[in-house]
Image (cartoon, rainbow, N blue to C red):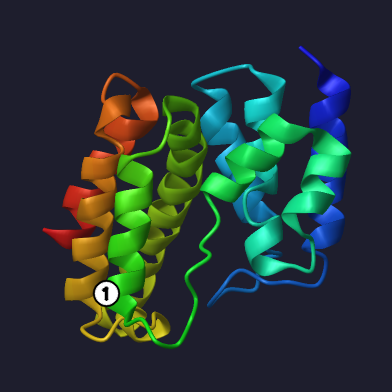
Amino acid sequence: MNADLLNRAIIYATKAHAGQMRKGTNLPYIVHPMEALAIVATMTDDPEMLAAAVLHDVVEDTAVTTDDVRREFGDRVAALVTADTNTRKDKENTWHERKQAAIERLSAASYDEKMVALGDKLSNLRAITIDHEKHGEALWKRFNAPDGRTDIAWYYRGLASALSDLKDTAPYHEYLTLLAKTFE
């Protein structure tokens, strides 16, 4: 494995997310990409996939561009990061339209793209499950979803369907378990 590529990606993501906090917590944001990396590492040891997992939010949530990622880490890593980047943030689309588009993009994604996305989505679902246990129904106010829990459940169920190609992996089974625990 090319540990240098992964080490550079971890440092790059840490610097890019410096000063950011995980929504609704006092945790540094980098905890989420590192968790996504750990999840993807249970499915593959491909250094480009692992680099993409830790970098998955740099284009969406920082000043880093896809071209920056391509220049630093190559075409494949940039493509994997871009596949997990929400680009439809325009005000003309409703929350549901944006999330439906994300589900559809993920449904059409490659197996590798889905692995990176599962690292991201499972990390998010773990946080939601833990925060729901701590904060109860007040948690749903944290999200921009119009109907709170109902909308978030719809979205995460749609993601489960889009990620079903990964049904033979432990992270996908954990995702389904948390989905049932949190939303049923």
Residue 140: percent from left, percent from top: 31, 79
Q: Is residue 77 visible?
A: yes
Left or right: residue 14 compared with residue 79: right
Residue named by callout 1: 96
At horizontal 34% and vertical 39% (from top left) the residue drawn is: 108
Left or right: residue 64 compared with residue 136: right
Left or right: residue 110 compared with residue 56: left
- 110 up-or-down from 61: above or below: above
At horizontal 40% and vertical 67% (from top left) the residue drawn is: 131
Q: Nearer the viewer, residue 67 or 7?
A: 67
**Helix, strand, or loop for circle 1?**
helix
At horizontal 83% and vertical 65% (from top left) the residue drawn is: 18
Q: Quadrant location of the N terminus? A: top right
Q: Is residue 177 visible?
A: no
Residue 63: percent from left, percent from top: 79, 68
Label 1 amino acid? Answer: His
Residue 45: percent from left, percent from top: 63, 16
At horizontal 37% and vertical 58% (from top left) the residue drawn is: 102
Q: Nearer the viewer, residue 52 or 27?
A: 52
Q: Quadrant location of the C terminus? A: bottom left
Q: Quadrant of residue 21?
A: bottom right
Q: Quadrant of residue 114?
A: top left
- 109 up-or-down from 47: above or below: below
Left or right: residue 70 compared with residue 115: right
Q: Of all residues shown, which one is farthest toward the top?
A: 1
